[in-house]
Image: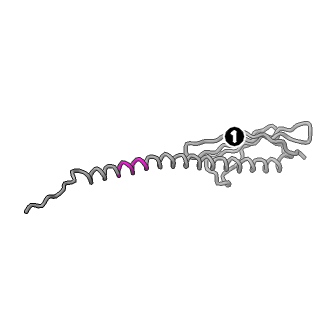
């Protein structure tokens, strides 16, 4: 008596190859989306740092408008703010009315992204 066995010529191998290719495709999509998420997180960090630098510059300028800092660019120390690779420059220009013009240039970096912005404000000079 002979037993007949059905042979599965490469069926399991084809399933494994298909599963590996699907996993690879999904990993490629997830890698691209994770890169986008990392970029957006870096941008959000830079915007938050810019806001902190801007608020610090305005607070410093409000307390130092009476000193002889008119029309000078002043580099403020940002080390204690724990914002690595940041720079903050303030320039106070007096005007005829009760308000002084304040120009703030804030720069901060993370990885390969660098953000530099200049803000202009009017602050009380008395």
Left or right for 97, reference 5: right
Camera-nearest residue between 85 and 117: 117
Q: Residue at 85% x, 44% y: name it.
A: 123
Does 20 lie within the magenta span? yes
Residue sticking out furthest to the right: 97
Q: Looking at this view, name the residue that lies furthest to the front.
A: 1
Q: Is residue 59 left or right of residue 126?
A: left
Q: Quadrant of the rendered structure where residue 88 is?
A: top right
- As drawn, the residue found furthest toward the bottom would be 1
Q: Which residues are magenta?
A: 19-26
The N terminus, quarter of image = bottom left
Main secondary-structure element of the magenta-colored stretch: helix
Query: Which of these two is toward me, 19 or 72?
Result: 19
**Numbered marks: total:** 1
Q: Position of residue 14 (x, y in %)?
A: 28, 50
| Of residues 4 and 124, the one drawn nearer to the viewer in this rendering | 4
Its colouring scheme is: one colour
Residue 87 image offset from top left, x and y in percent:
67, 44
Residue 117 on the magenta segment: no
Residue at 69%, 43% (x, y): give it: 106
In the image, residue 93 lies at what x, y percent?
A: 83, 38
> Which residue corresponds to mark 1?
117
The quadrant in which residue 105 appears is top right
Of residue 74 and residue 24, the one placed in the foreground of this image is: 24
Per the image, label 1 sits on a secondary structure element best described as strand
Question: Which residue: 16% across, 58% down?
Answer: 5
């Amino acid at each position: 008596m002979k037993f007949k066995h059905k042979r599965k010529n490469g069926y399991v191998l084809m399933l494994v190859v298909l599963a590996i290719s699907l996993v690879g495709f999904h990993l490629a999509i997830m890698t691209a989306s994770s890169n986008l998420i990392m970029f957006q997180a870096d941008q959000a960090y830079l915007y938050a740092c810019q806001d902190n630098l801007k608020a610090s510059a305005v607070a410093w300028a409000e307390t130092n408008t009476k000193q002889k800092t008119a029309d000078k660019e002043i580099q403020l120390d940002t080390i204690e703010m724990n914002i690595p690779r940041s720079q903050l420059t303030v320039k106070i220009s007096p005007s005829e009315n009760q308000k002084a013009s304040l120009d703030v240039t804030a720069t901060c970096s993370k990885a390969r992204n660098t953000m530099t912005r200049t803000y202009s404000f009017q602050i009380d000079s008395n």
